[in-house]
Amino acid sequence: MFARWLPAAINTRPAEWSRAAIGMALGTLFSVWVCAQLFGLEVALHLLGPLGASAVLLFAVSSGALAQPWSIIGSYLCAAVVALLIARVLGRTLGSACLAAGMTVILMCWLRCLHPPAGGLAMTLVLADPASIALGWQELAPVMLGAGALLACALAYNNVTRTRYPKGTVDSPAVVLGNATQVADPSITAADLKQALAEMEQFYDVAPSELEQLIHAAQGHARRRSIGEVLASRPAA
């Protein structure tokens, strides 16, 4: 039971940690600086927490579904609209802030743009500073400007440092099937997956043991599908 609390080893090298750390710092600095130029430092600093959290995902876990362009743009828009609406209707209280975060999660799931920092952003916008409150609905502008600036920095920095972003669709390799009785596919283990992840030199937010379970489950479904196709193709007696 206690072993479950131990963290899994990160499947990246220190060079990747440094690359992500520098990108996160530069991206956050750039997005906050851009907001400060147009809306003032007080408003920009109020967005520092959510933008910094988003930067961790965009630069350190750029291959994950939570860090893709639509995730940050869509989630920030959802959080801003929900938070400003609830703040106007229910006031700026702790309960309203928590309600805004919960409704933001539902909306993000529906629009397929789940991005964890947006939950914190919704709370931040409800419990805003006086300068942000004075903007009213115009607070959408600095929020989206910060998200756009951070995304632009991630697109530039990740690709310049040879980390493909955004994540594209990966084509499945062509498989040539021979005599099924003569070829036996080796079982993939967690150790094999761990070694493969290390060779890719990027951090993927999934444990090798979870990947192993997923692959074995998929292999079971594939076998059942293949057996069904073979039985269906046999001529009736």
Image (cartoon, rainbow, N blue to C red):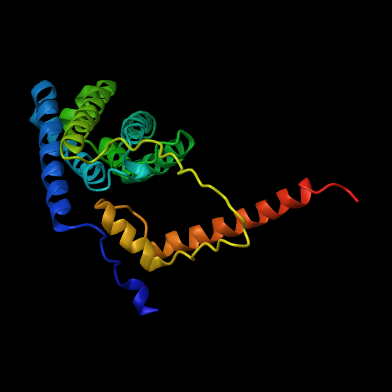
Q: Quadrant of residue 101?
A: top left
Residue depicted at 40% across the width and 40% down the height: 170
- Residue 163, x across and y down, in percent: 23, 41
Determine the residue positioned at 24% across, 22% down: 141
Residue 74 drawn above or below residue 213? above
Task: Locate the N terminus by quadrant.
Answer: bottom left
State the image coordinates of residue 219 (x, y, percent, origin top left).
Answer: 56, 58
Above or below, comparing residue 138 to residue 223 in the picture: above
Identify the residue shown where x is 53% and y is 47%.
176
Left or right position of 198 against 232: left
Front-most of 84 and 178? 178
Location of residue 5 in the rendering, given as x and y in whole percent from the top left corner: 33, 72
Picture quarter containing residue 100?
Answer: top left
Q: Residue furthest right?
A: 237
Compared with 125, 102 (above or below) is: below
User: Looking at this view, is 229 or 64 the one in front?
Assistant: 229
In this view, the residue in front, 128 or 150, is 150
